[in-house]
Image: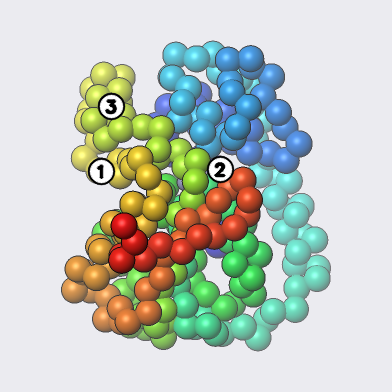
């Protein structure tokens, strides 16, 4: 599974800040940054902010993998998820999705992007997941305090266009209320012709302050 570290903002300085703040034990030294999360800070900060010192840490991941591989015992896992389930969720670094949902290695596909939005590429993955790898159940997990709540579709596009001269051709998919956005995602799934199995779709919002998920249904007011 892929673990994101911050909204993929096109501004290098912002991305660097998000990466640094996502590292365990690191705290922002720049007083202009608020105290919540790297994800939030990366979105909120403008590209004119001073760039904080950054040191890449991929080598630490290589060392981490050495420890993982030394204890590895899952070589018999099959490519098809044993729960026949796909989880679509945000890339937020605070969501360690396997323990968060009590999932085990090899049990579910995890599809992640900024917001856990149902985009064409998510539908591509779901299509493959269901048609070729046997999944039959879809679980959506959005969350509170998402970075996409801090930007607007037009605002971010205008900012980028002013900065680099090109307006993004992709949708930002910003939203105000994660509960409403889960419903939007559920409706998109129901409308796409490319996903054959839609009988078992559940939606949730993960509360980053409590660690709990709260279910959302299309019948909710
Ligand atoms: Zn998010």
Within-10-Å neighbours for mark 2: few <14, some 14–19, many 20+? many
Whether residue 59 sits left or right of residue 119 in the image: it is right
Q: Earlier in the sequence, mark 3 or mark 1?
A: 3
Q: Earlier in the sequence, mark 2 or mark 3?
A: 2
Query: Residue tagged by mark 3?
Result: 155
Mark 2 vs mark 1, CA separation in Å: 20 Å
- Residue at image position (31%, 19%) is 163
Closer to us: 124 or 139: 139
- On-image quarter of the C terminus: bottom left
Query: Residue tagged by mark 1?
Result: 171
Whether residue 103 sits left or right of residue 192 in the image: it is right
Determine which quarter of the picture holds residue 75. Answer: bottom right
Within-10-Å neighbours for mark 3: few <14, some 14–19, many 20+? few
Q: Are marks 3 and 1 in contact (CB under 8 Å)?
A: no
Whether residue 72 sits left or right of residue 195 in the image: it is right
- Residue at image position (63%, 51%) is 210
Q: Is residue 4 visible?
A: no
User: Secondary structure beneath disc 2?
Assistant: loop
Q: Position of residue 15 (x, y in %)?
A: 50, 32
Query: Residue tagged by mark 2?
Result: 5
| Badge nearest the viewer, 3 or 1 | 3
């Amino acid at each position: 599974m892929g673990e994101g570290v911050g909204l993929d903002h096109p501004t290098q300085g912002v991305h660097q800040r998000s990466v640094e703040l996502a590292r365990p034990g690191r705290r922002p030294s720049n007083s202009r940054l608020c105290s919540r999360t790297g994800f939030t800070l990366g979105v909120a900060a403008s590209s004119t902010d001073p760039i904080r010192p950054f040191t890449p840490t991929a080598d630490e991941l290589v060392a981490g993998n050495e420890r993982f591989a030394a204890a590895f015992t899952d070589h018999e896992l099959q490519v098809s998820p044993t729960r026949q389930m796909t989880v679509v969720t945000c890339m937020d670094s605070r969501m360690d999705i396997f323990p968060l949902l009590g999932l085990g290695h090899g049990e579910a596909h995890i599809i992640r992007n900024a917001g856990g939005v149902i985009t064409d590429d998510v539908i591509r993955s779901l299509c493959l997941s269901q048609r070729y790898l046997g999944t039959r159940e879809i679980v959506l997990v959005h969350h509170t305090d998402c970075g996409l709540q801090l930007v607007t579709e037009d605002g971010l596009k205008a900012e980028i266009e002013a900065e680099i001269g090109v307006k993004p051709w992709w949708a930002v998919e910003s939203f105000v209320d994660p509960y409403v956005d889960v419903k939007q995602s559920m409706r998109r799934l129901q409308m796409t012709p490319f996903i054959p199995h839609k009988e078992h779709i559940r939606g949730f919002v993960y509360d980053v302050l409590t660690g709990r998920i709260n279910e959302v249904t299309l019948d909710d007011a």
